[in-house]
Image (tube, helix red, strand yellow):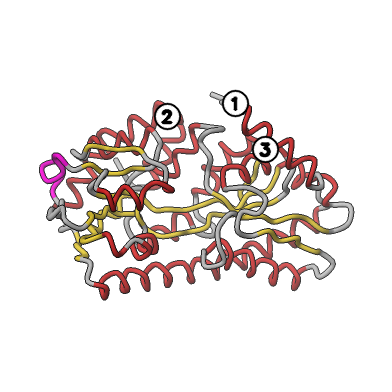
Amino acid sequence: MTIKPKLSALFKSCTLAAAVSLPLASNAQADDSFILAQAMNTDHIFHATSEQFITELDAQNPDYDVEYHPGGDLGDWTSLFEQTMQGAIPMTITYGASEFDPRLDLTWLGYVVDSWEKAREVYGPGGPMVDVYNQILEENDLVSLGIIPAGFGSITIRKGVGKVPTNFPEDAKGIKMRVVPTPLAVERFNNLGFSAVPMPFSELYTALQLGTVDGRAFGPAVEIWQMRDVLESYVLTRDYFEHAFWLVNKDWWDDLPEQERKDIRAAADATLNVVWDKARSIDEDYLAKVREHGIDVVELTPTQLQKAKDSLYANEWPYMEDVVGTDIMDMMRKIAAIN
């Protein structure tokens, strides 16, 4: 099944503005320069990836000039996804925007992996997930050069709640858990026994302060550290592995001379090997900081972890199969070693 992007008026206007203000991707080839944009600040792994790539590309092909735009100065992560899809920007590092294709919610799928070693094997350089995602992305005029890791997401509870849920669904009853605003996220945490509250990230900190929600899901260690003053416990469910895409516009990519594609690919591959090592180190460092700050960091027992996995495999995975189709989910089951 092919799902064509549906563009809202707002996104269309963003793309039009970008097309007016930026050189088209097809023009980037002419002067051996192109735009690389990402929406995160300079502390983020996206920035470290971008800088490493520029260095690596200069070693491969010093004639290239990368016009780098960090910090979202060309739009937020959703807008950058769309602008790259439409060809206004040739390259971006961003998350999968399921507004344009609901199959991209596959990035949130629970318990594909539960360790850094397995994550690198599955999502890292040479891993099978790039090919799985490219089956979806290429229908949206995009190609992924690789996957950028951010770390494992788990659940955290705000100060004053006094609950540490580790047995699901029993311990989760009555806990209002903020989830990312996607149907898959609501499905997961309702199945785990929580009252799932979809909420944009921009509203989360205030909601934790005011008690609008009791906790948050989809939290990698770096984000727990950022909100440490309102949190009391961090339960390492590791229910998903947060990652993003390194995307290029497919038409721009296909039109490049073969040698230039090889140069960019070689620079990207070298960068990915560095970034995967760096991302794991960053994730582990922030988890240590969370512990040192006094937040109660709780590991699930093997029995508790397996119970959580079984719930997602029985409920969430069939739900996702209705979205992405049997062929892709069969690949996912093979990747996750689920019989």
- Residue behind mark 1: 6
Task: Kindly give the residue lying farthest to the bottom in the view shown.
Answer: 292
Local SS, label 1:
loop
**Amino acid type, residue under disc 3 in the picture:** Cys
Dominant SS in magenta = loop
Measuring from the top left, give residue 124's x and y in whole percent.
49, 59
Q: Quadrant of residue 136?
A: top right
Q: Secondary structure at mark 3?
A: helix
Residue 326 is labelled as 2
x%, y% of residue 253? 74, 47
239 lies left or right of 98 = left
Viewport quadrant of the C terminus: top left
Boundaries of the magenta span = 167-174
Q: Residue at 40% across / 60% down in the picture?
A: 151
The extreme top residue here reads 1
Circle nearer the viewer, 3 or 1: 3
Q: Residue at x 69, y 51 (%)?
A: 91
The reply to whether discs 1 and 2 touch (Cβ–Cβ < 8 Å) is no
Please report the residue visible at 63 percent of the width from the left and 64 percent of the height from the top. 50
Mark 3: give few (<14), some (14-19) or many (20+) Cα within 10 Å: some
Question: Which residue type carries mark 1?
Answer: Lys
Q: Position of residue 210 (x, y in %)?
A: 27, 49
Front: mark 1 or 2: 1
Q: Alpha carbon of mark 3 to alpha carbon of mark 1: how far?
A: 14 Å
Q: Quadrant of residue 158?
A: bottom left
Q: Is residue 153 left or right of residue 133?
A: left
Nearer to the camera, 89 or 72: 72
